[in-house]
Image (cartoon, rainbow, N blue to C red):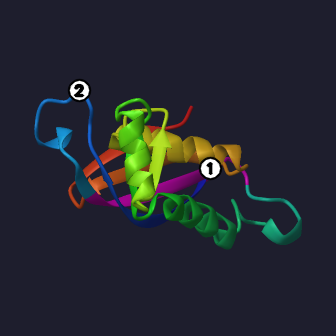
Amino acid sequence: MYGLKTEASFDSAHFLADYHGKCENLHGHRWRVVAYLRAPELGAEGTERDMVCDFGVFKRAVRELAEEFDHTFLVEDGTLRPETVAALEGEGFSLTVLPFRTTAENLARHFCERLRAGGLPCSQVDVYETPLNCATYLAD
């Protein structure tokens, strides 16, 4: 089995609805995303001969995903009143409304699924909320 790893980071704010503790309040993180690819065999021909994947392709995919989330307010769909969302957007704030609770666990799954949908053999994504706290999603 062969593997590759790359990472990217982004800054964003979020809150956890229906949570009782500090994280129910709006706060931010310097999120660190570490993605892993896995393949049983290396490419047999062409540009990616003897590679799992071109590192440039892999790095770009992970960094582009991180860039989508950079300096945005991550909001679980339905947790803010529509008029609140409209007011924030009216003030020029960047919101990323997601169909899931914005936990590190769910973000790890989301990143992994997006990479796999893009044709990369993603096997794992780690998402760090802080330098010492990490959630992992393992595909398969």
Q: Quadrant of residue 19?
A: top left
- Give whichever of 135, 92 is nearer the camera: 92
Q: Which residues are magenta?
A: 29-41
Q: Disc 1 to disc 2, how far (Cα)? A: 29 Å
The mark lying in front, picked from 1 and 2, is 2
Query: Magenta-highlighted stretch: main secondary structure?
Result: strand
Query: Which quadrant is home to the C terminus?
Result: top right
Figure label count:
2
Which residue type carries mark 2? Asp
Residue that lies at the very extreme toward the left in this rendered image: 21
Mark 2 neighbour class, 10 Å CA radius: few under 14, some 14 to 19, many 20 or more:
few
SS at mark 2 in the image: loop
Q: Earlier in the sequence, mark 1 or mark 2?
A: 2
Q: Quadrant of residue 132?
A: bottom left
Residue 97 in the image: state x and y as whole percent: 47, 42
Residue 99 in the image: state x and y as whole percent: 49, 33
| Residue behind mark 2 | 18
| Residue behind mark 1 | 115
* Residue at left offset 41%, top offset 43%: 85
- Would you say residue 136 is visible in this rendering? no
- Give whichever of 69, 139 is nearer the camera: 69
Using the image, determine if residue 82 lies above or below residue 26: above
